[in-house]
């Protein structure tokens, strides 16, 4: 049977090839989700850990435990050390399961005292120091003077080394012998040390060092094994601390190992509870690992929301092609059944065919998915690609697991038309061809209305979750996600498409009836053909509506996400560049005799010259902005602490600040004009209304124990540059903001450092402005740059994944649309060879036949494309906001706004134009090659 199946596949090779393309793309896209998610999270993890190293100077894979013996009785110090040492050097290290780049064990005696064996003066002071031993020390230092210590004592003299800083700090000399009087007294024998070498770190980037090298400025180093022999094995009670440190290779920390590391850390922490008061156990990477499950969920939710419509479109495509293949084979199936073939035999032959196709897809799909992931990683925007470091993408068992289930799903999809056709005998088949077509199943049972109802429920659930987010401030992925939300977009497009198909025949009839007396013959024939097609064109129309809508949804989603992220950055900064000069001054604390903080001393601020900012090369406009928190507001006999105030110069602020015009009831210039009406005018956030404040009320403001100043409320604002009106995560209190005139504030209150907001000229760069600042000797203490933050935002793996997924979905959708379109029309032409032969035999020219096809294309493909564009726009407006579910309410400022640009629609129009042109060209080519005699002979047969 396999040979027969393969022969049939070769006979239908073009159809099978189209089916294979769809299957491979489906498997590739589904298998790419785990590969891409893991790769992105892996890079996010590595970047987070690298930024931790840049911020702190400590190695990210640091695993550090420090035990203090101060509160352990001398008799059990050796026991405690041995127990912990066996754990940290054995079981604990193995449980982490990562390669070790470097590591050391440290033993120390704190506050040891030494005296020169040969006194330098009559009043010789004791020298206080730390005696420390580190394993493998010699491999990680360089001796700059002298030599390395011996591993055995020379009589009662123990050799040590020190850093150059320690030599100066302790005031000790090279090759000089010192008596450790405290240690000698405890040991009951002389214990002398001799500094034989001065060392420095061999490699500043060496992860061997658990602490910064400067921390050893009062330390002398002894051989580790010698330290154990003299102070541990003899249970001398002198040891005051021990440390265990490993530098695990964090680059080998893959996502599948995170759970193991977290479990090991929790178990070890639990075991160490008995030592909790004396041990300091730190693994800095743990907080980053703990949040990765949430970040992984966010990324997966995003990818599924974006790719589910594309997956279903591919399933739609596979079903359509499978149905066309089966319809082509319908006569053969009916003949086989009439000759005694069972339903199972026919079904098995198609099962083998689908298994062969999906087997090839299963082999090729994951590798194509691997390539797609690389394309996703280089996405810098929608349909924009740049060169950047490749993602660490791997073909994992999880990817093959996804691929296997995708292949299985599409085997089922391919077999559905087969199962529906194997029940038909040849007599039933001929009767069905001659019979008037019955109402389709979906029309009879109102599937279109049911799908729209499900989509409406999805919107209702989304609105519910948005309310929860706004009330709690948590992220959407922390809520239990309703799976219907993943399908809402697809369900709405399908429901709307089916609803259109329900009314489409009436549109054709009404249009035909209106112009029945004026239609030219070609158009008249097109109306007759479409009107009597018994709904055969509906599948193509639904496919085109679905694919074009999904493509537009992807384009609008990408544009919306990218623009909203840019808006969020611009809103949070307020303008192109925000800087603060060096004002000096501030509050300082003197030091007491015992080293504690003394009295607070306030130094006056010195306002730097403002004019140089306005004359910077590349700056179009500049303004002063005072922005500060911890403001106390007295209103209606109530006092509100921790408010924020912004002092501005209204006319300058309007020229410099960035603000979206849809955020306030009126254009925001209207609110700036209110501030110019009175020096005491103020705009306050809407949160003040909860305290009973109304327009015209007086409020009193102060900070830093100064006198209250009076302001009058001129209007309320929900949004203002840099102001986030949402409550912070975990807090129910909304923030308060007051916007007032800077000149009035400076007149009434003490001078304070203000920010300078700069708006760049068109074409100017930040580098150009900063270079001019350097030339003008402008010293900055703070700086925020929109351009830098936007670049950093575009490098965010989450945004890259979103752009990549949307680009991939758009390309695949357009590609599949063209293939599906051509398949349908080619098969349609092949079925109508007799009809076209008769038309040509009747004397109809090739041009008129082609014009008839053009009209059919307009009535079917053109109408479907137009509806697809409309449905895509409506879907975008309704369902693109679903992407907000991965953010908390505090992260959605300014509010999400669906954006559709003409250039994105132009891409779709260009695709539709090329699709229709290609279709007409191919169809015209096929018709021009029709042999009239052969067509008529075919009709006789």
Image (cartoon, grey):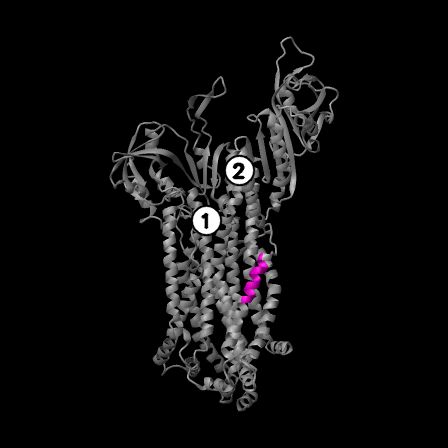
In whole angstroms, how far apart are the C-alphas of marks 2 and 1? Answer: 25 Å
**Rendering quarter of residue 439:** bottom left
Callout 1 secondary element = helix
Q: Give the range drawn in magenta.
A: 398-408
Q: Which residue lies furthest to the bottom in this view?
A: 940
Q: Are the two marked residues, 2 and 1, in contact with CB atoms closer than 8 angstroms?
A: no
Marker disc for residue 566:
1
One can see residue 476 in this view: yes
* Residue 881 % position (x, y): 41, 55
Q: Mark 2 points at which residue?
A: 771
**The one of 767 and 748 positioned closer to us in this rendering:** 748
**The one of 412 and 469 positioned closer to us in this rendering:** 412
* Residue 557 % position (x, y): 45, 57
Q: Which label lies toward us, 2 or 1?
A: 1
**The one of 437 and 833 positioned closer to us in this rendering:** 437
Callout 2 secondary element = helix
**Rendering quarter of residue 117:** top right
Does residue 890 lie above or below 448 as drawn?
Answer: above
Q: In the rendered view of the protein, which quadrant contains the C terminus?
A: bottom right
Left or right, 893 with respect to 789, comes to left
Q: Is the magenta stretch mostly helix, strand or loop?
A: helix
407 part of magenta stretch: yes
């Amino acid at each position: 049977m396999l040979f027969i199946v393969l022969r049939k596949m070769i006979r239908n090779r073009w159809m099978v090839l189209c089916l294979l393309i769809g299957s491979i793309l489906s498997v590739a896209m589904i298998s790419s989700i785990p590969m891409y998610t893991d790769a992105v999270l892996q890079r996010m993890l590595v970047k987070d850990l690298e930024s931790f190293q840049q911020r702190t100077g400590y190695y990210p894979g640091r695993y550090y435990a420090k035990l203090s013996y101060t509160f352990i009785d001398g008799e059990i110090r050796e026991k405690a050390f041995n127990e912990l040492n066996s754990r940290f050097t054995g079981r604990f290290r193995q449980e982490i399961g990562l390669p070790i780049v470097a590591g050391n064990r440290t033993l120390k005696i704190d506050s040891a005292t030494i005296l020169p064996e040969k006194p330098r003066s009559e009043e010789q002071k004791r020298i206080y120091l730390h005696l420390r031993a580190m394993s493998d020390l010699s491999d990680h230092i360089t001796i700059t003077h002298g030599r390395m210590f011996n591993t055995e004592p020379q009589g009662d003299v123990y050799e040590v080394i020190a850093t150059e800083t320690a030599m100066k700090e302790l005031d000790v000399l090279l090759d000089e012998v010192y008596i450790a009087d405290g240690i000698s007294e405890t040991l009951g024998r002389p214990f002398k040390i001799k500094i034989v070498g001065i060392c420095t770190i061999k490699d500043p980037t060496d992860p061997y060092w658990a602490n910064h090298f400067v921390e050893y400025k009062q330390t002398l180093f002894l051989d580790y094994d010698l330290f154990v022999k003299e102070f541990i094995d003899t249970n001398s009670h002198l040891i005051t601390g021990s440390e265990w440190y490993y530098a695990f290779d964090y680059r080998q920390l893959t996502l599948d190992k995170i759970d193991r590391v977290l479990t090991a850390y929790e178990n070890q922490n639990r075991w160490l509870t008995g030592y909790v008061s004396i041990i300091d156990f730190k693994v800095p990477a743990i907080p980053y690992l703990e949040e990765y499950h949430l970040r992984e969920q966010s990324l997966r939710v995003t990818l599924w929301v974006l790719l589910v419509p594309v997956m279903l479109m591919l399933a739609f495509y596979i079903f359509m092609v499978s149905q066309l293949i089966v319809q082509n084979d319908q006569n053969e199936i009916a003949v086989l059944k009439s000759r005694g073939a069972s339903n199972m035999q026919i079904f098995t032959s198609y099962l083998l065919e689908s298994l062969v196709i999906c087997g090839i897809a299963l082999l090729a799909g994951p590798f194509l998915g691997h390539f797609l992931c690389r394309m996703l990683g280089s996405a810098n925007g929608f349909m924009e690609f740049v060169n950047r470091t490749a993602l660490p993408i791997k073909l994992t068992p999880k990817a093959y697991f996804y691929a296997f289930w995708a292949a299985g799903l599409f085997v089922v999809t391919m077999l559905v038309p087969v199962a529906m056709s194997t029940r038909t005998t040849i007599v039933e088949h001929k009767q069905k061809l001659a019979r008037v077509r019955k109402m389709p199943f979906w029309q009879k049972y109102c599937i279109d209305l049911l799908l729209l109802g499900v989509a409406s429920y999805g919107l209702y659930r989304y609105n519910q979750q948005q309310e929860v987010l706004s009330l709690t401030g948590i992220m959407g992925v922390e809520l239990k996600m309703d799976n219907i939300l993943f399908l809402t977009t697809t369900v709405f497009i399908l429901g709307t498409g089916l609803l259109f198909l329900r009314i489409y025949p009436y549109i054709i009839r009404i249009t035909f009836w209106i112009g029945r007396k004026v239609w030219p013959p070609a158009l008249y024939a097109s109306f007759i053909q479409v009107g009597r097609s018994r709904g055969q064109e509906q599948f193509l129309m639904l496919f085109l509506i679905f694919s074009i809508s999904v493509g537009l949804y992807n384009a609008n989603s990408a544009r919306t996400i990218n623009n909203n992220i840019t808006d969020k950055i611009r809103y949070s900064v307020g303008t192109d560049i925000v800087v603060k000069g060096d004002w000096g001054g501030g509050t300082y604390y003197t030091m007491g005799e015992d080293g504690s903080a003394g009295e607070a001393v306030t130094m006056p601020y010195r306002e730097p010259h403002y004019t140089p900012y306005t004359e910077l090369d590349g700056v179009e406009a500049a303004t002063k902005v005072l922005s500060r928190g911890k403001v106390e507001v007295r209103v209606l006999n109530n006092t509100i602490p921790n408010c924020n105030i912004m002092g501005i110069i209204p006319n300058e602020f309007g020229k410099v600040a960035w603000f979206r015009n849809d955020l306030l009831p009126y254009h925001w210039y209207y609110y700036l004009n209110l501030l110019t009406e009175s020096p005491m005018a103020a705009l306050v956030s809407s949160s003040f209304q909860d305290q009973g404040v109304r327009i015209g009320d007086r409020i009193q403001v102060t900070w830093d124990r100064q006198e209250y100043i009076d302001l009058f409320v001129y209007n309320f604002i929900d949004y203002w540059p840099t102001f986030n009106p949402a409550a912070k995560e975990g807090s129910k209190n909304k923030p308060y903001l007051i916007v007032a005139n800077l000149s009035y504030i400076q007149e009434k209150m003490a001078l304070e450092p203000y920010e300078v907001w700069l708006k760049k000229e068109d074409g100017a760069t930040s580098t150009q402005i900063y270079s001019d600042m350097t030339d003008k000797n402008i010293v900055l203490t703070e700086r925020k740059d929109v351009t830098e933050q936007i670049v950093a935002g575009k490098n965010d793996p989450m945004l890259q994944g979103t752009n990549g997924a949307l680009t991939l979905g758009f390309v695949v959708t357009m590609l599949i649309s063209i293939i599906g379109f051509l398949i349908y029309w080619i098969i349609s032409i092949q079925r109508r060879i007799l009809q076209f032969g008769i038309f040509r035999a009747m004397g109809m020219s090739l041009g008129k036949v082609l014009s008839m096809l053009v009209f059919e294309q307009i009535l079917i493909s053109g109408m479907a494309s137009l509806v697809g564009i409309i449905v895509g726009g409506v879907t975008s407006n309704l369902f693109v906001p679903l992407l907000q579910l991965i953010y908390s309410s505090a992260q959605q400022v300014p509010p999400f706004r669906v954006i559709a640009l003409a250039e994105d629609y132009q891409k779709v129009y260009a695709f539709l134009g090329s699709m229709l042109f290609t279709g007409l060209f191919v169809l015209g080519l096929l018709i021009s090659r029709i042999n009239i005699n052969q067509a008529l002979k075919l009709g006789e047969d």
